[in-house]
Image: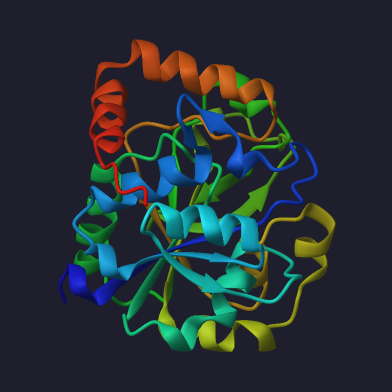
Amino acid sequence: MTQNSFSIVIPARLNSIRFKNKILHKIYNLPMIEHVRRRAELSLIPKKKIFVATNNQKIANIVKNFRGNVLKTKLRHDNGTSRVSEIINFLSSSYIIILQGDEPLIRPNDINKIIKEIIKFPNYEVYNTTSNLTNEEYNDKSIVKCILNSKNEIIDCFRLSKNIKKKSKYKKIMGILIFKKKILKKYANLKKSYNEKKLSIEQLRFLDNNYKIKAIQLSKSTQSVNYFSDVKKVIKVLNNDTVQNKIYNRINTLNDYI
């Protein structure tokens, strides 16, 4: 197994409830979706295996104008995983890494760590990145939390705080899910559980259908964009974090616009 065993897909839509059209919102001179896609290009995964999956022609045109790869999907999907499952037969890789289009600070080295961890633990069918929670994130219901067992498997996901004394037992669910291709082929036939419907947490479909989810712990959380106010937080990080600033400077030189 090598990096060629992996593809990256970024599901993208415009009708976000909390922040409409957020993935096309410009952060400095680039749409948010381009921050994510270009950071993926800085990972070990070849550019030809990095795709944006979208139902929207405007998104498709913007990505294509930046010479990105686009796969068109139907209009409606419950979540990003469902959207990626629709185009799974167009992907030749054994493992599919799903990046969210509202994670403009994703670090390329974190993608590389995912590859290394899956090569080390290849017997799982579903993986999810996690990180430690800050006090602010702990009380934010827009952020999905999870509990791990002794094998670093995710055994529960939730939004509101649970009555557990040790907050250290909680982890933040990061916006990167990884699947073996054969699981995504079965996705449409997996029963949508009551918990998934109630909490809008797609990981619960797998847990409630008795799939194990291996957690891949990342050293540091990154700021996602759920609300318009989060854009300022992202810009602050880009201005003040040396590593993030270097990554931004690198993606800004990938000037492939037609």
Left or right of 175, for residue 206:
right
Q: Quadrant of residue 225?
A: top right
Residue 4, relative to residue 158: is it above or below? below
- Residue 83: image x %, image y %? 62, 71
Residue 25, relative to residue 87: is it above or below? above
Asked whether the viewer can see residue 107, the reply is yes
Which residue is at a point 54% across and 35% down the rendered structure image? 224
Left or right of 190, for residue 166:
left
Quadrant of the rendering where the N terminus is positioned: bottom left
Residue positioned most to the left: 2
Give the image's coloring scheme.
Answer: rainbow
- Residues 87 and 58: in front is 58
Asked whether the viewer can see residue 135, the reply is no
Which residue is at a point 78% across and 62% down the rendered structure image? 195
- Residue 63: image x %, image y %? 47, 55
Left or right of 224, for residue 246:
left
- Residues 23 and 80: in front is 23
- Residue 98: image x %, image y %? 46, 61
Which residue is at a point 64% across and 38% down the rendered structure image? 143
Which residue is at a point 31% across and 77% down the rendered structure image? 123
- Residues 179 and 64: in front is 64
Q: Quadrant of residue 86?
A: bottom right
Q: Quadrant of residue 127?
A: bottom left
Residue positioned most to the top: 240
